[in-house]
Image: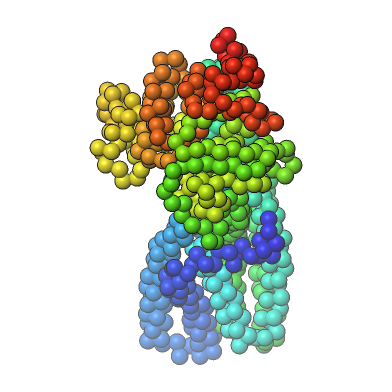
């Protein structure tokens, strides 16, 4: 956590979200002041009536009683209207702030680099997007109200009571700081407990998501009991954490109730002494008892709000933790849009490692891919094939050297304009939950039905899509679970056809398919690659025999380069790999 957060900067970090709703907040606090005034008037009315009743009963006329009754009735009507505004528009304001924060959080998550998601847990992020920010809603609404009301009540009560008896008032208010000290001590412990419980909720969500998304694997290995045990372990840990927090809360509330009782004893006993010695009147004594009740009510409200307050602060803290993460890959201040070009790619002395304490995956790589050229990358696992392809769209920033597209350094252009010129087809196809049409149209938002069908036809997908129950409107299920691997792959290819990029990256796009599907997909990919600069990562070596150039990439860099026939004739690493593949 940053020093700013440790020093209480969380609240300052949160305050700007009130800016859009400042008039709602101001009127909400005005209503809070009205409700407080209404509550403070009652002890004064009772004091006036008691004073007249004990000093001169004749002055306690029916007219005075009616006036007091009407005044209090009017105040109650005002109090009701003010409470309605606070309960409705105040909560709506809190919800709008939550919405704004969720918008900012999602936007920031979209900006974070692949390196962040390499280690992040989606379930934890979901917890921060939902339950954490829901707690902030209540915090945003109630926090200003509760502290504002408590402040008015304490200050007003102090001033009013001082007009009756300064010594007695000072004695009573001297008992408040110990209560505040108790509150602050327990609050610190509660904050730590809620932070730990939030962290465990995120872990639990992540575990549930992992288990449910992999439910087919779970069932195929008959591992239901194992998953249940894993879940129960995390669930029990959450129970232990929450139990610890509630024990702290129990001690917090019990201590406060004890202070509450001691305060009443103090007022009754010391007030009685002042009453006996003529320091206060009977009317003042009654007023003191009523004002102390008001004070205790305020303190109890703060006590009850403490849990909500800590939940809100924990939510803001966890929100800030993500917002404070800088994307490792970001546009320069003077970044320009990458113009349309031929699609020439150049690697100049490029080195890359995933973190400072890891070895270089790519070291001093020099490579030129000419416009329209189709090159293939082969080699042992861990040689850097996928990494190299991830560097072209700048999913990661290189450690040394430069990558140029049409002579322009990709570090000098905006990420959006760079990636608009690159299309990627991966082995692990991701389809969004929605219709076939929506998934294809992802390649070009706003595309017409004709454009979508044309792209599907080029990808060899139009025929099977028409046979689906609802055609292009068929729901594909979560991650496309209702479609076969070949069908999902053809939809992903149609998506790239619709995007119409200059540069194409094929990351083992057919390695997970059966022979029949591979043949269909390969034809689609050949149509897609025509006229485009293409980099293919190959697992099945038969699919790259027609590549213009094949590169053998190992830990030592590019060890061999040439056409299929040239490399077979050379009888080196590629020839050996091809023999092994053919033997299988």
Q: Is residue 454 above or below residue 157?
A: above
The furthest residue to the top: 583
Q: Please indicate, yes or no, whether residue 382 appears anywhere in the rendered image.
A: no
Quarter the C terminus occupies = top right
Q: Is residue 358 above or below residue 320?
A: above
Q: Position of residue 262 (x, y in %)?
A: 69, 67
Q: Nearer the viewer, residue 567 or 228?
A: 567
Q: Please indicate, yes or no, whether residue 573 appears anywhere in the rendered image.
A: yes
Q: Nearer the viewer, residue 98 or 41?
A: 98
Q: Quadrant of residue 501?
A: top left
Q: Position of residue 309 (x, y in %)?
A: 58, 59
The furthest residue to the left: 450
The answer to whether residue 106 is left or right of residue 1 is left
State the residue at coordinates (51%, 46%). 405
Q: Quadrant of residue 62?
A: bottom left
State the residue at coordinates (59%, 71%). 295
Q: Is residue 99 above or below residue 404?
A: below
Q: Is residue 261 above or below residue 103?
A: below
Q: Nearer the viewer, residue 211 or 331?
A: 331
The answer to whether residue 324 is left or right of residue 439 is right
State the residue at coordinates (46%, 19%). 513
State the residue at coordinates (27%, 29%). 471
The answer to whether residue 575 is left or right of residue 18 is right
Q: Position of residue 453 (x, y in %)?
A: 28, 33
Q: Nearer the viewer, residue 332 or 97?
A: 332
Q: Quadrant of residue 241?
A: top right
**What is the total number of numbered labels drawn onto the structure image?**
0
Instruction: Give the colour scheme of this rendering.
Output: rainbow
The answer to whether residue 551 is left or right of residue 360 is left
The furthest residue to the right: 357
Quarter the N terminus occupies = bottom right
């Amino acid at each position: 956590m940053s020093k700013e957060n440790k020093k209480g900067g969380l609240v300052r970090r949160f305050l700007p979200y009130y800016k859009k709703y400042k008039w709602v907040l101001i009127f909400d606090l005005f209503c809070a002041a009205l409700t407080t005034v209404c509550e403070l008037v009652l002890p004064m009315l009772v004091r006036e009536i008691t004073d007249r009743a004990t000093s001169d009963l004749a002055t306690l006329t029916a007219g005075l009683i009616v006036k007091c009754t009407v005044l209090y009735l009017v105040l109650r009507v005002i109090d009701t209207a003010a409470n309605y505004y606070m309960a409705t528009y105040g909560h709506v304001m809190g919800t709008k702030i939550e919405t704004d924060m969720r918008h900012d959080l999602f936007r920031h998550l979209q900006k974070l680099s692949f390196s962040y998601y390499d280690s992040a847990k989606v379930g934890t992020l979901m917890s921060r997007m939902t339950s954490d920010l829901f707690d902030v809603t209540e915090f945003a609404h109630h926090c200003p109200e509760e502290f504002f009301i408590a402040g008015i009540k304490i200050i007003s009560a102090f001033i009013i009571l001082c007009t009756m008896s300064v010594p007695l008032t000072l004695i009573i208010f001297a008992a408040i700081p110990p209560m505040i000290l108790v509150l602050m001590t327990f609050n610190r412990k509660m904050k730590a407990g809620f932070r730990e419980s939030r962290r465990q909720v995120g872990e639990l969500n992540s575990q549930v998501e992992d288990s449910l998304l992999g439910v087919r694997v779970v069932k195929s290995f008959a591992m239901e009991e194992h998953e249940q045990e894993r879940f129960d372990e995390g669930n029990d840990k959450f129970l232990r954490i929450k139990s610890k927090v509630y024990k702290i809360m129990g001690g917090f509330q019990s201590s406060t109730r004890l202070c509450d009782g001691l305060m009443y004893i103090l007022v009754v006993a010391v007030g009685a002494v002042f009453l006996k010695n003529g320091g206060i009147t009977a009317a003042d004594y009654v007023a003191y008892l009523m004002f102390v009740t008001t004070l205790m009510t305020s303190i109890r409200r703060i006590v009850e709000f403490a849990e909500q307050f800590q939940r809100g602060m924990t939510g803001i803290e966890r929100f800030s933790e993500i917002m404070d993460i800088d994307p490792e890959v970001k546009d320069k201040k003077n970044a320009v849009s990458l113009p349309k070009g031929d699609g020439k790619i150049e690697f100049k002395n490029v080195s890359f490692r995933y973190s400072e304490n890891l070895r270089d995956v790519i070291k001093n790589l020099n490579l030129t891919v000419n416009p329209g050229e189709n090159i293939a990358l082969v080699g042992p696992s861990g040689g850097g094939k996928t990494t190299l392809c991830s560097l072209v769209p700048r999913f990661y920033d290189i450690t040394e050297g430069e990558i140029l597209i049409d002579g322009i350094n990709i570090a000098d252009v905006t990420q959006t304009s760079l990636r608009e010129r690159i299309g990627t087809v991966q082995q692990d196809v991701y389809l969004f939950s929605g219709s076939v049409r929506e998934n294809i149209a992802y390649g070009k938002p706003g595309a017409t039905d004709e454009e979508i069908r044309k792209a599907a036809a080029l990808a060899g997908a139009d025929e099977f899509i028409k046979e689906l129950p609802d055609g292009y409107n068929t729901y594909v299920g979560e991650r496309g679970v209702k479609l076969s691997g070949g069908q999902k792959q053809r939809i992903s290819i149609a998506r790239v056809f619709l995007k119409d990029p200059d540069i194409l990256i094929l990351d083992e796009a057919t390695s997970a398919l059966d022979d029949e599907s591979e043949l269909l997909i390969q034809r689609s990919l050949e149509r897609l690659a025509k006229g485009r600069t293409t980099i293919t990562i190959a697992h099945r070596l038969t699919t790259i025999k027609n590549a213009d150039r094949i590169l053998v990439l190992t830990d030592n860099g590019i060890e061999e380069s040439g056409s299929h026939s040239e490399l077979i004739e050379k009888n080196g690493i590629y020839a050996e790999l091809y023999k092994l593949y053919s033997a299988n």
